[in-house]
Amino acid sequence: MEVALNNNHKFLSKIATNDGHGENSPYFDGWKAYDANPYHPQNNPSGVIQMGLAENQLCFDLIEKWIKNHPEASICAPQRGFDFKEIALFQDYHGLPQFRSAIANFMSRVRGSRVKFDPNRIVMSGGATGAHETVAFCLANRGEAFLVPTPYYPGFDRDLKWRTGVELIPVVCESANKFKVTLESLEDAYNKAKQSNIKVKGLLITNPSNPLGTFFDKETLKTLAAFTNEKNIHLICDEIYAGTVTNGNDFVSIAEIIEEFPTICDRSLIHIVYSLSKDMGFPGFRVGIIYSYNDTVVNIARKMSSFGLVSTQTQHMVASMLSDNDFVDNFIYESRTRLAHRHDMFTRELAQVGIGSLESNAGLFFWMDLRRFLKEPTFEAEMTFWRSIINEIKLNVSPGSSFHCHEPGWFRVCFANMDDATVMVAIERIKSFVLETRMLEMKTKAMAKTKKQCWQNNLQLKLSSRRLEDIMSPHSPLNSPMLRAQN
Ligand SMILES: Cc1ncc(COP(=O)(O)O)c(C=O)c1O
C-alpha cells in the first residue's frame, strides 16, 4: 500500500500526498511501538504498556449495567422499543430531536447545571475531530490562522489544518508560571502573525487542557474573551474534558462566562466543541458536537455535518442513556471519583521516587517532569530519552515536543485506559528505572571520585619525588633567585 502511494504521488492531490495527517510524528510512533509489542499480563508481560492513549475506561461497568437494564435502547435487542425501519432509513442532518435534547441536558449536568444549552444549537459531527474541522471551515479561509496556546493536542494539526489549509500559530506558555496563558503571550503571537501578514481569525483553547490536565480560572477566561473581542476574532473552546474535572464545581465553562458577563464579548464569536469521547469514554461512537452562539455558523455547520453524521442507532442509544438523569448524575460523580483516585495514586507513587508532575485535577493524563533525566536541555535529548523509555522501560508515554511544548523534558502520561494491575506494573517499571539511573549516577560519581583521588595521589607522588629530585639537583628551580625573592 505504502509503495503504491509513493509511486503514484504525481497523480494525486496535494492534500492526499502532503504530510498533514501527522502520522509520522513521535506521537503516533509510540502507538506503532505499542502495536508491534503490546503488553499482556500473561501472554506478553514484557511488552509495551500503552500510556499514550487518552481513553476513559474506568466506568465501563456502569455503562454495561445500564445497557443490560435497557435493552430497548439497542438495535440488537428483541425488546427494542422502536421500528427497525426508523433506524435504517436515511436521516435528516439536523439529528433526532431527542438526541439533541439529551446532549444539551448532558452538557448542562456536566457543568453542574449552572448553565443551560439550547438543543437547537447542537450540531453533530464525527467526534470532536470532525467538529474542529467543520468549525475551521466555517471560520477561516486557506492561509488564515488560529492562535493556540502551547502545549496543545497534536491532533489539532491534522483536524484544523490538513484539509482546510488553515494555519495554527503557537502562543508560547512556560513552566515558570505553570503553563498559564498570559495576555502578553497572546499579544506576542498575534503581533508575530501580523508581521508575517497572516490574518488571525481566532483563538483555540482546550479547557480543561490536553496535555496539562489543568483548566482555566474565571479571570483568565474573561481575559481571553475580552482579548478575542477586542481583536474581533473568534474564540473556540474545546471542552471535551469538562466531565473529567475531579472537583467539578471548580470548572468554569465559557458558556458560564458569557451568561455571567454578557457585555464582555460579542457572543456570536464564541463556539464550543464537545464530544462524548472523553467524558463518557465513547470515542468509538464518534459523537462530536459543535455548539455555536452564532446563528449562521450553526446553519452552515449543520449543512457541513452531512460529511460526518452520527448514525441513527447511536443517536437513539445516546438519547435514551443521556436522558436518564439518575444514571447521568451517578455516572459523572463516579467517573470523577475514580479518575481522581487513579490520578492521585499514580502521581503520589512517582513523587516517592522524586518524579514530579504539573499540579492538575482534570483530564485522563498528567504532565510528567523528566527534565532532570535529559543529557542536555534540547529536543534531540528529549527524543533520545523518549526512545529509551519506549525500548527499555517499555512504556509509551508521549514526548512534550509532539504537543509543541517549548521546553524539552515534559511527557504526557495517560492513566485511565488500563486496569489497576497494569498501572502497578507501569509504576514499578518507572521506579526501577529511576533507581537504576540513581545507582548508575552514584557509581559514575564514585568512579570519578576514585579516579580523581588516584590522579591526585599520583600527582602528589610525582611532585614529592620531583621535589626530592629538585632538592637533590644542583640546578633546582627552587634555588632560583626569582623564587627565593617571591618566597
Ligand atoms: C483536546 C482534544 N480535542 C479533540 C479530540 C478528538 O476527540 P474525538 O475522539 O471526539 O474526535 C481529542 C482526542 O484526544 C482531544 O484530546
Image: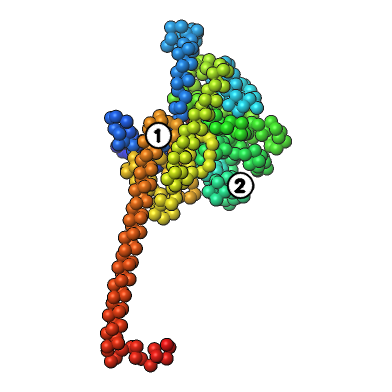
The furthest residue to the right: 263
Res. 350 image quadrant: top left
Looking at the picture, which amino acid does disc 2 mark? Thr
Q: Is residue 292 left or right of residue 354?
A: right
Mark 2: few/some/many CA within 10 Å (<14, 14-19, 20+): some
What secondary structure is marked by label 2? Answer: loop
Mark closer to the chain start, 1 or 2: 2
Ligand 1 neighbours mark 1 (CB distance < 8 Å): no
For residue 168, say whether it is visible.
Answer: no
Q: Is residue 243 left or right of residue 410?
A: right
State the residue position of label 2: 182
Residue 132 location (% of width, % of height): 52, 33
Q: Is residue 386 left or right of residue 197?
A: left
Q: For the residue labelled by badge 1, is the local secondary structure a helix, a strand or a loop?
A: helix
Disc 1: which residue: 423
Residue 482 on image: x %, y %: 39, 91
Q: Give the percent coordinates (x, y) of residue 214.
A: 55, 39
Instruction: Please state, as top left, top right, bottom left or bottom right, where the N terminus lies in the image.
Output: top left
Give the spatial CA distance, label 1 vs label 2.
Answer: 35 Å
Q: Amino acid at mark 1?
A: Val
Front-most of residues 94 and 73: 73
Camera-side mark, 1 or 2:
1
Disc 2 C-beta below 8 A from ligand 1: no
Assess disc 1: are there few (<14), some (14-19) or many (≥20) residues with their C-alpha within 10 Å of its C-alpha: some
Name the image quarter holding residue 485. bottom left
Name the spot of residue 17 as percent of width and height, x first: 39, 38
The answer to whether residue 189 is left or right of residue 45 is right
- The dot on residue 79 is none
- Residue that appears at 44% across and 25% down: 284
Residue at the spot x=54%, y=21% of the render? Answer: 330
